[in-house]
Image (spheres, rainbow, N blue to C red):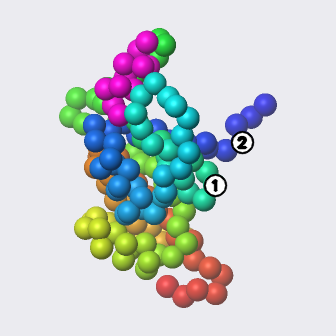
């Protein structure tokens, strides 16, 4: 038995609406179905996949503690063991324009050797997000 794919990433947020809006408006995910859980939050979808879950931090920590799950705080000075989460995009210029419209600064990078074009942004909680757009076979950069 092996792991076959990544299911989702959970982002803890003090302001779940601001976080939801960031991922919907700037990144292009959409809010979808979510079961009635013991804490407030949203499931955001890319296509049919609920790939990003948002949970209200204090409620989630209380719930996790109640079931015996320890939630680790970030190390002193900020940061975490996870550097970023990444999504695949389909239109680099359209994504860059969407980020600009929403006032989200992006760091741009082109991977050498025909690799993807990348946009790096930070969400309202300090989570680094990478968006990769792979060039089509006949697409010039």
Question: According to the image, label 2 marks what residue?
Answer: 4
In the rendered image, residue 40, in percent from the top left (x then y), is placed at 40, 33
Q: Residue furthest left?
A: 77
> Residues at badges 2 and 1 in contact (C-beta under 8 Å)?
no
Q: Is residue 136 above or below residue 56?
A: below
Question: According to the image, label 1 marks what residue?
Answer: 48
Q: Is residue 115 above or below residue 4?
A: below
* Residue at the (43%, 72%) spot, across then down: 95
Q: Nearer the viewer, residue 98 or 134?
A: 98
Q: Nearer the viewer, mark 2 or mark 1?
A: 1
In the rendered image, residue 59, in percent from the top left (x then y), is placed at 35, 25
Q: Main secondary structure of the magenta part?
A: helix
* Residue at the (41%, 15%) spot, across then down: 65
Of the numbered discs in the image, which one, if any, rests on residue 87? none
Q: Nearer the viewer, residue 93 or 17?
A: 17
In the rendered image, residue 33, in percent from the top left (x then y), is placed at 56, 45
Q: Which residues are magenta?
A: 56-66
- Image quadrant in which you'd find residue 48: bottom right
Q: Nearer the viewer, residue 6 or 134?
A: 6
- Image quadrant in which you'd find residue 26: bottom left
Q: Can residue 20 be found in the magenta stretch?
A: no
Q: Residue furthest right?
A: 1
Q: Quadrant of the N terminus?
A: top right
Q: Residue furthest front?
A: 36
């Amino acid at each position: 038995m092996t792991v076959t794919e990544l299911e989702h990433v959970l982002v803890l947020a003090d302001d779940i609406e601001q976080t939801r809006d960031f991922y919907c408006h700037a990144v292009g995910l959409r809010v979808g179905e979510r079961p009635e859980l013991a804490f407030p939050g949203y499931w955001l979808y890319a296509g049919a996949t609920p790939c990003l879950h948002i949970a209200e931090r204090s409620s989630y920590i209380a719930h996790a503690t109640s079931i015996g799950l320890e939630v680790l705080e970030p190390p002193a000075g900020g940061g975490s063991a996870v550097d970023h989460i990444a999504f695949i995009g389909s239109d680099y210029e359209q994504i860059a324009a969407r980020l600009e419209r929403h006032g989200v600064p992006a760091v741009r990078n082109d991977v050498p050797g025909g690799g993807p074009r990348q946009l790096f942004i930070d969400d309202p909680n300090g989570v680094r997000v990478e968006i990769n757009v792979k060039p089509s076979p006949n697409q010039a950069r």
